[in-house]
Every structure is written in structure tokens, then in C-alpha cells.
Amino acid sequence: MYHLLLPDLEQRQALIAHLKAQGIVSVFHYLPLHLSEVVAAARRKPGNCPVTEDLSDRLLRLPFYNELTEADQMRVVEAFA
């Protein structure tokens, strides 16, 4: 897996939009555990783990799947040029 850590949430969202416009799906899916529904029932609140929340907002995973061809990989790399 290849992850990028962007400077802030705004830049992460802009990069997701840029890649999507080129037909490249990038995702973020790391919700801090203390903000999950299960733990939220225990009255955990945003701000309890500021470092974790900051990193979660900035983390982006590049495409990663078995059928990813070398040509697909090059499209992802070229999207950053």
C-alpha cells in the first residue's frame, strides 16, 4: 500500500478531486478509533486525540488492487507531474 500524508485536509481533498478528474480513485478510510460509532457510544468526542485526528485528515491511500496494471501505475505517477 502507498499512502501520502498531505499538509492539511484541504490539500488532501484537492488531490482527491484532481486524481478523480483523471479517472484515478484515491481513498481515505482511516477513521480514528475513538471517533468510530462503537466508541462514540462511550462519549468520546472529537478533539480527544488531536494528533490521531490530524493524521487521519491528511492521510490518502493511492490505488491498490490486484488488477492494477503497470500502465495504471504510470497513470497515477503521471497525475502528479
Image (cartoon, rainbow, N blue to C red):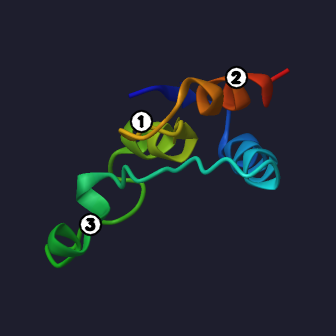
Tag 1 residue = 51
Residue 77: give its label: 2
**Residue at the location (43% across, 46% down)?**
53
Front-lying residue, 49 or 67: 67
In the rendered image, the vertical position of residue 59 relative to residue 48, given as above or below: above
**Residue 1 lies in quadrant:** top left
**Number of disc labels:** 3
Q: Amino acid at mark 2?
A: Val
The percent coordinates of residue 8 (x first, y second) are: 67, 38
Tag 3 residue = 36
**Residue 37 lies in quadrant:** bottom left
Q: How far, Cα to Cα, is label 3 from label 2?
A: 33 Å
SS for dot 1: helix
The percent coordinates of residue 33 (x first, y second) are: 24, 54
**Residue at the location (74% across, 48% down)?**
10
Disc 3 vs disc 2: Cβ atoms closer than 8 Å?
A: no
